[in-house]
Image: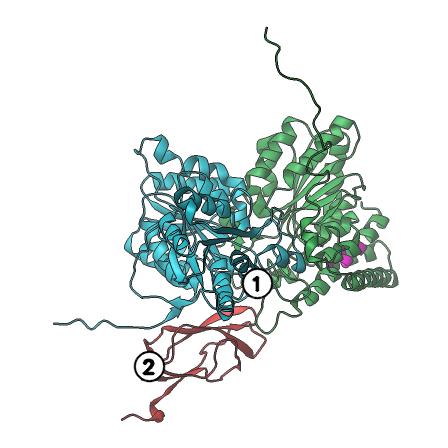
Amino acid sequence: MVPVNDLQEMYRDMVTARHYEERLQEEYLEGKQPAFDISAGPIPGELHLSAGQEAAGAGVCQHLRDDDTVTAPHRPHHVAIAKGVDLKRMTAEIFGRETGLGKGKGGHMHLFDPDVNFACSGIIAEGCPPAAGAGLAAKKRNTDSVGVAFLGEGAIAQGAFLESLNFAAAHDLPVVFVIEDNDWAISMPKERVIDVEDGAKRADGFDMPGVRVDQDDAAAIYEAADEAIGRARDRNGPTVMEVQVHRRMGHFMGDPESYRTGEDQEAAQGRDSIVRLEEDLRAHGIDDETIDDLRDEAHERVEEAIEWAKEQPEPEPEDAYEDMWVNPPSGVTDSEPDYDLAGGDD
Amino acid sequence: MSGDTDRVEVTLDKWPDDADSDEGVVVNWFAREGADVEAEESLCEVQIEKVSVDVLAPTDGTLAEIVCGEDDEFERGDTLAWVEP
Amino acid sequence: MSQQTQKVERDLTMSRAMVEAIAEEMRDNEEVFYMGEDVADYGGIFDSTEGLREEFGYDRVMDVPISETAYLGAAVGAAQAGMRPIAELMFVDFFGVAMDQIYNQMAKNTYMSGGNVSVPMVLTAAVGGTYNDAAQHSQTLYGTFAHVPGMKVVVPSTAYDAKGLMHNAIRDDDPVVYMFHKRLMGIGWLPAPDGPKTPVPKEDYTIPFGSADVKREGEDATIVTLGLHVHRALEAAESLAEDGISAEVIDLRSLVPLDTETIVDSVEKTGKLVVVDEDYRSYGVTGEIVASVADESLAALDSVERVALPDVPIPYSRPMEQEVVPDADDIAAAVERTQE
C-alpha cells in the first residue's frame, strides 16, 4: 500500500513533468517554421521529451534523498524533476543561458545538479558506471546512500550496462538499475533489437534480483522501487528493475515517427499513468479540488521556471574558454623546487 | 512546333496522410530547367511539417519551367513546375 | 552503331549521392550489406540509408542493437570472412564505446597477419556540429581517426565527391572510415550551405584516395581544409577576392592517405599556408598539415595560420558554439594575417 502522501507527491511531480514537456515542446518549435531548422529558435539542438514516462521518475525518486545519486540518459527531465533538481536553473540551461546549471555549456542532455546528486549524459548507458561508482563511494564511506541509474530498454544492449551489472554484483554495491521500457529505440522496436521481452531478465545472469513492472502504474513502480532501494540501503546488493512506460511524443522533437503505426501511437496515448494515478488518489479519498490544486501548483511552477529562464542573460562568446579546469593548468604549484640531482654514483 | 498546351504540371501527387498542414516548402531541386527528365524521377524534395517527400516527374520530357524554387512555400495542389513531354 | 546515352543533368544532395553509390554496389554484389542503428525504417538519422531498406530488405539493411562494440566487431568478423559490410556509427562521438574493435582489430589485423587477412569494410560515421548538439554529439574527430595507423580515412565535402569516394571505399579491400558531415547531407531539418549539392553523374565512378581537390584556384594564399569548412573557406575566398586577395582552396577529401604533393605545390606557389579544421587544434589536422609542408618544403613557407576548434569541449549555447567553431570571417582574417 502506498501512503497517500507519497501518492500526492508523485502526482505533483508527474503533472509538473508532463506540463513541463508540453511547454518545452511549444517553446522549442518556435522559430523553427516553416521548414524545421534544428538550430533555430530559443531552444536549438536536440530535445528528447519524456511525456508518458513520468511514472518511472516519480515512482523511483519518491524513495530517494538528496544524498542519493541519480544518473539519467538523454531523456532526463521527468527524472530530474522527481529528484528535486533546481527547476529554474535547469530550464535556463535548456535555454542555453548563463545562469543555467552548466552555464549554458551542457544543454538539455548534460544537466548536472550536485546539490541533489543528479547528472545525465547523452551517450547510451554511460550513466550506469558512474551510478555504480556512487554506490562504491557510499559503501567505502559506510553511509546508507544509494546510486540509481536510469536507462532505456534499448540500452541494455550496451556494454557499459552489462559491465556495470557485473561490477555492481561482484562488489556488492548499493545500486539500482531502472530500465524505462517505452518500446522504441528511436525507430527500432524492442523486438527487433533486444533478445528478451523482459529486460529485467538481464539480472539473471548477474547474481542479482530483477523485477519487471508492467502496467505504466506509478503506484506499482513505487512498490517495486521501495524494495529495490531498500535492499540497497540495507546493504543487500544491487537490483535491476524494468518498468513499462510509453513515449507520447517522438524520439526527439522533429521526429515525424513515420516508422510508428497509428495504432501504436494511439495505444500509447491511451495508457496515461497520470490519469491512472488520479484514479488511485480518488480511491484513497482525495477529492477533486485537492487534485486540481496540485495540478495548478505544478503548472504555475513550470510557468515560473520558464519565464525566469527566458529572462536570463545569454553567455558571452568568450565564456566558451572557461571552466576547462578546476585548478589552474599548472596544477597546485607554479614552480619547481631546486634540487641538485647531479652526482650520486654508487 | 509544340506550344505550351502540351506542358504537364508537376505537383505533389500524394500529400502525407498524417499531415495537418496544407502548406509545404521546397527544400531541394535536383533537376535543372532545360534538363531531360524521366518519368518517376525525383525532381525535387519538399517538406510538409516535418516530413520530407520527393516530387516525381509525371512523364518523360524536359523540365521546362520551375515555378516554386528552393525555399519557396506552396499550398496543397499548387503547381511546382512544368514538364514538356 | 552509335549508342544514344541518356544524358540526365541533375544535382543531388550529398546524402542522395552517397546512397546512390551504396545502392549500386549492393545491386552489384550480394555480399555488400549495411548495418547500423535506425538504418532500416528510419533511413538513417542523417539520411545515410534513405530508401535502401525499401529496395534491399531488412536482411541487407540491418538495424542493430545499441551495441557498437558488438556490431562494429561483427563487421570486422564478417569482412574477414570475405563479405563487404558497411557499418555505421550514428554519431562519430560514439566511437568511444567501440574503439578497440576499430583501432585494435579493424585497423591492425591486416598488418599483424602479415597481409594474410584483410578487412574489406567501410565504417561510416556522421560528424560535425554547428547545430547546438553539445560536446558529446558535435565532434568531427578527424585527427583521432587519422592518427592511428591501419585505416583509410575519407571526408567528402560535395555530392560528387561523396559518390566517387563511396564507390572506392566499398570496393577497396582495406578498412575505410567514411566521415560524412551532418550539415552537408542536405537534410530538411539541418539546412546545408549551397556548395555540397552538385551535379552527379548517373553512372558509377571512383575517386582515388590520397587525391586532394583544388576547389578554387588562387595566387596569394593556400587554404587547406575539409568537410564543412571547404564551403566556409570558399565563402571566405569570395569575400577576400573583393579585397584583391586571391585564395586557393584545397579540399583534402582524404586524410589517410594524405595528398601532400598538391598541398606543397600550392604553398610553393603562394608561400602562405592557412589550415582550417573543425576538430580540436592541438595534436590534429592543422598541426599535421603544417608539419608535412615544413618537412618537404620549409623554405617555401612564409607564414602559417592554424584555424581550428580551441581545445575545449564544444559548448551547447549558441553564442559559445559560434565562437568556437571557425566561420568564414575567421578564415578570411587568418588569410589576411598571412598577407601582412
Can you give x and y, in whole percent of width and height, for residue B72 in the image?
A: 52, 79
Residue under label 2: B62
The residue sitting at 61% across, 54% down in the picture is C324
Residue under label 1: C329
| Horizontal side of residue C308 vs C34, given as left or right | right
The residue sitting at 44% across, 60% down in the picture is C249
Visible residue check, residue C215: yes
CA separation, marks 2 and 1? 41 Å
Kind of residue indicated by mark 2: Thr
Dividing the image into 4 quarters, which one contains the N terminus of chain A? top right
Q: Is residue B5 above or below residue C156?
A: below
Mark drawn on residue C175: none
Dividing the image into 4 quarters, which one contains the C terminus of chain A? top right
Chain letter of the residue carrying label 1:
C
From the rendered image, report the letter of the chain displayed in cyan.
Answer: C
Which sits in the foreground, A157 or A340?
A340
From the rendered image, report the letter of the chain displayed in red.
Answer: B
Residues at discs 2 and 1 in contact (Cβ within 8 Å): no
Can you give x and y, in whole percent of width and height, for residue A292 in the image?
A: 84, 63
Range of magenta residues: A11-18
The crowding category of the residue bearing disc 1, from other C-alpha atoms within 10 Å (few below 14, some 14 to 19, many at least 20), is some
